[in-house]
Amino acid sequence: NNIEGTVPSEVGMLSQLQRLWLPQNNFKGTIPTEVGMLSRLQNLLLGENNFEGAIPSEIGLLKQLSQLKLHHNNIHSAIPSEIGMMSQLQELRLYENNINGTIPSEVGMLLQLVDLSFAQNSITGTIPSEIGMLKRLQKLELDDNKIDGVIPSEVGKLSQLQRFWLYINNINSTIPPEIGMLSQLQDLLLDRNNITGTIPTEVGNLSMLSKLNLQSNLITGPIPTEIGMMSNILHLILINNTLTGTIPSGMMSNLQSLHLSHNRLSNSMLHLSSATSSLQYLNISNNLLTSFPFSENGFKELVTLDLTENLIRQNVFMFIDGLPSIKDLLLSNNFFYGSIPNAIRSLARMEKLHLDNNRLIGTIPDDVLSLVRLRELKLSHNRQETQCFEALTECGAQPYQGGVLCCGGDNGEQVCADGLGVEIVDPIYYCLTPGLHGTIPAGFTNTPYLQVLDLSSTLLKGNIPPEIGGLSRLEILDLSNSALTGSIPSSLGALTDAVVLVRGNDMIRGQNKNDRIAPLSLCSNVPGFDLVEDKTWCPPERNFLKAFYTDAKGQEWTNVTGWINEFNNHCEWHGVKCNEEDKVIKLMLGNGGLSGRISSKIVNLTSIENVDLHDNDLKGSIPSGIGKLVNLSSFIVSYNAITGTIPDGFDSLSNLQLLHLHGNRLRGTVPLLASKGGNYSSFISDCGSPSVFDSPLDCPSCTMCCNSQNECDMAEKKTDFGMWSSVFIGSAVFALLILAAPLVKEIFTSNQNVPATSNVASNEHYTIGKDSVYSFFLSTSVTAWIFAIAVLATQTLCFGFFIDEASLDFGDDRMWQYSFSCPPNNLNCRDNSDVTAFGWIFFALFGFFYLTGDMINGLKLVWSASKYGLSLKGFQIFLGGCCLFSITALGLYATVVYNVATSRSNVDMIFNTVILLFVNDLDEKFFASLHAIIPEWLEKTTHEIAGSFLGDVRMNVQYASANHQLRDDQTRRIEGIEKKVARRSNAIKTIEVRHTKLKKNVADLRTKQATKNKEMKRVIAKIIEQEKKVEALERFREQQSRKLKGIERNEVRVVADNKKLKENITRLEEEQAIKVKEFKKVEQNNQELNTKVETLESELRNLRAEMQSFVGMVQILSQLQKE
């Protein structure tokens, strides 16, 4: 179950409870002490929970308890001594906790105990001798603790014991001989302690024993011969001790596994054949054996044989031919000789074949590859030094006719070699090179489970079979230090998780005989390749370029000539150029169909000078660490889809002369570059407006800025014409002040003013323009002055707007037209402006003929103002001249700067000039409008100006005639305006067509809005439904409230019942007090019982002494019998 929480203390009130089973839950907290009140409890099972704290001492009051299971919890206290009071206890399981302290001696009082398990705790101290009193005990599990001291001899009294587990402790004594008295013992596990001494011969008396494990102790001496008497033993484990002597004869007939490794056993094994026909696992590695017995039908069931690290000198043939069921044959590090027989194909179950570090000769038979289950094949270090012998005296009298030749060695041993290892120097001398010869057999596709293939340090020649690369499970491939030739197969690059060792084969070359280069896939995909750090075999820059190819989706490139060829030099790949040291200095892959991203490995090409990746579809960001490329002079990634920010490092590239980042989606700031660049196309980025982002890229060092429309302009053109306007107007005012010098002089030198009614003939009215509102400055009418000032302000604002929009600010989207383009197929930007000298000449002529008159008239008025001295008329003439000159000059300036900013053709220049000169005529157009709207007022004002400046009637007549002429001129001008209006009407019609399309779009939007409204109605309907549900819930709440009132009435009754219950509890407490008194009486009885127990213990000590003397007599008798 998954019950959680704690066990309530009220459980102690269940006085009739006999079984409390709560295993495999999630109970927490401590075990309540009230459990001790369950006097009739027989079974208490609280295992596999999360109980903490201590085992309550009150548990000793459970006299009827037969089962106590508290295993697999978090109890972290000592075992209470009161546990010895549970006289009926049969099963005590406390394993897998954090119990500390020692084993209490009171455990010996549990005379009915059958199963005792304190395993996997932190118990310290020694095993109490009182444990020998548990006559009925069958299982004693004390493993995985911190118990030290000795194994008490009283253990021999546990006549019913079947399992004794004491492994992983700190026992530091000998094995007591009394252990041989455990006639029912089946498992004896004493491994991983500090047990000393020898294996007692009495172990042979354990006729029921099936498993004996004494590994990893300090046991010395021989294996007792009596151990062969244990006919039922299945597993004998004596690993990692210091056992000496021979392996005894007559081993157990039912033995299945025998572990004797890491001892000092010597000589040969005697009769370990027919008596061990059931043996499946035999490990005698790391000993001093010199031979291994074989007889017919001796090891038919043997699955694993491990004789590694011995001194065995036998022909390997007998091991191949006499083990039909073998899976793991481990014969490494011995002196086995002979050749591997073809009969090896009969070992169809073979999984591990270790024959390395021996003295094998001959070739590797193809039959090895018929072992389809083979997982490990180790044949390494089967090679000896060449020795030469006298043919007649040391190699036999007969001449060599082929096959195996044996000659006498220096130390009396024979040296043998097959035909491939025999060299006849002359008829007198034979030189033998023993070892495995020939080639590596082909056909490894038949061994798909192979994980380890070790053929190193042999005399194998020829090519490496490419099929080895198809062994997907291979973990280790060791072909090092042999005589292999040819090239390393590229198929080995598929062994991505394997260790591949080929070093020491001096005849291996690349695909071209003169090259020493390994396959690209092996260098880049297999980190366990032993030549991966060799810059000759595995040039690191080739791996970096492969990573670049992979990340940039090289399979989609338009030209991949040479790329990722397994054996080609990377300097021969398309777009790659290297220096004399095969270091990449150029990577030129512009317009090559690249996509994906720029690999971060590019920053490892430390000698690279030029990177050109323009006009592709690269995404991602520019790799960080670009500052490592100190030799970089050009970095071109324009016209891709690169995103992110500009990484740090560009500012440290002192050799950088070309940086093209435009046509991407970069943001942020380009660092201040160390170099100045060669021309205006050196440093280009998307620092112009409009940008794909809210603000364009910030590039203080750029020579060219481009915008999102791929239009560019030189960064040095950045200009604020608003500031120059102030300079221009200031210069104009200064010029006017110089021209007004006569007026100033007249003011300070004249003794009297010129009368306002002077009859001096004057043409000031004609000079300022009778058809211009600026003539109103000559009037005394306030209204006329307001009109004149309003027109002057309007023209000034218009010209100011054009001047402001003509300013070039790359961070602000204005009307400046970028004049350059930086095409993908050219490193240099080109000027697209078509404005010629003709356009500027036309502009100059147009401006001269159109504006010169007004500017000269303005200057004339300023000059002629001095004739009127310090008078109102003089001031009016001076002001009118200043306004006429200034507004005309401002119009000329605005026309010039606006043409500079926006005209990119002669037509643009003409168009812009006409528009701006129209603004310059605004004063006359306004005058014509007044003539049409308020002709009487205008005629009166005009007469007032004329009368003021002409002085007589004849002049008025002349003025009327001139006015008539003016009207004719106005009529002609109006006709011209009507024509312009007609043209503008056509433009309006075009706008109306666009407006119609816009209406259609609005109608479509309204349709979509109607659809959204319908959806909104459905949502509102759902909300109404929800509100109805809420109302229903409110009604339900009212019903619940009525029910709650009924419950409250019931609570009143419950209170009355509780009073009665408390009275009952009081009565029970009184009964409990009586039981406590009885318990005290029981304790007194227990004290008396303890006194009796002490008496019994003294008697037991006497009996033990007598038993020891009896055992001594038995030993003396047994010695006498032997004698």
Image (cartoon, helix red, strand yellow):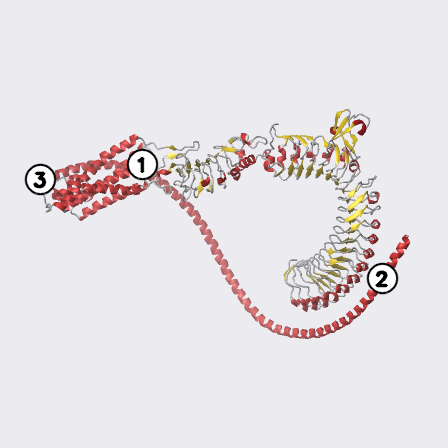
Dot 2 amino acid type:
Met
Report x, y in % for residue 1051.
58, 70
Seen in the picture, residue 430 relative to 134 is either above or below; the reply is above
Q: Are marks 3 and 1 in contact (CB under 8 Å)?
A: no
Q: Are marks 1 and 2 in contact (CB under 8 Å)?
A: no
Single out the mark in the foreground, 3 or 2. 2
Where does the N terminus fall, quadrant-wise?
A: bottom right
Mark 3–mark 2 Cα distance, whole angstroms, equals 170 Å
Q: Nearer the viewer, residue 987 or 673?
A: 673
Tag 2, which secondary structure? helix
Single out the mark in the foreground, 1 or 2. 2
Mark 1–mark 2 Cα distance, whole angstroms, equals 126 Å
Q: Mark 3 or 1 closer to N-term?
A: 1
Seen in the picture, residue 121 relative to 546 is either above or below; the reply is below
Please identify the quarter of the rendering in which residue 510 is found: top right
Q: Residues within 10 Å of mark 2 (few under 14, many from 20)?
A: few
684 relative position to 881: left or right: right
Dot 3 amino acid type:
Arg
Residue annotated with mark 2: 1107
Q: Are marks 3 and 2 in contact (CB under 8 Å)?
A: no
Q: Nearer the viewer, residue 682 or 56?
A: 682
Please identify the quarter of the rendering in which residue 950 is found: top left
Report x, y in % for residue 623.
50, 40
454 relative position to 251: left or right: left
In the rendered image, is residue 926 in sight? no
Q: Nearer the viewer, residue 612 or 83?
A: 612
Q: Mark 1 or 2 closer to N-term?
A: 1
Residue annotated with mark 3: 954
Residue 900's label in the rendered image is 1
Dot 1 amino acid type:
Val
265 relative position to 817: left or right: right
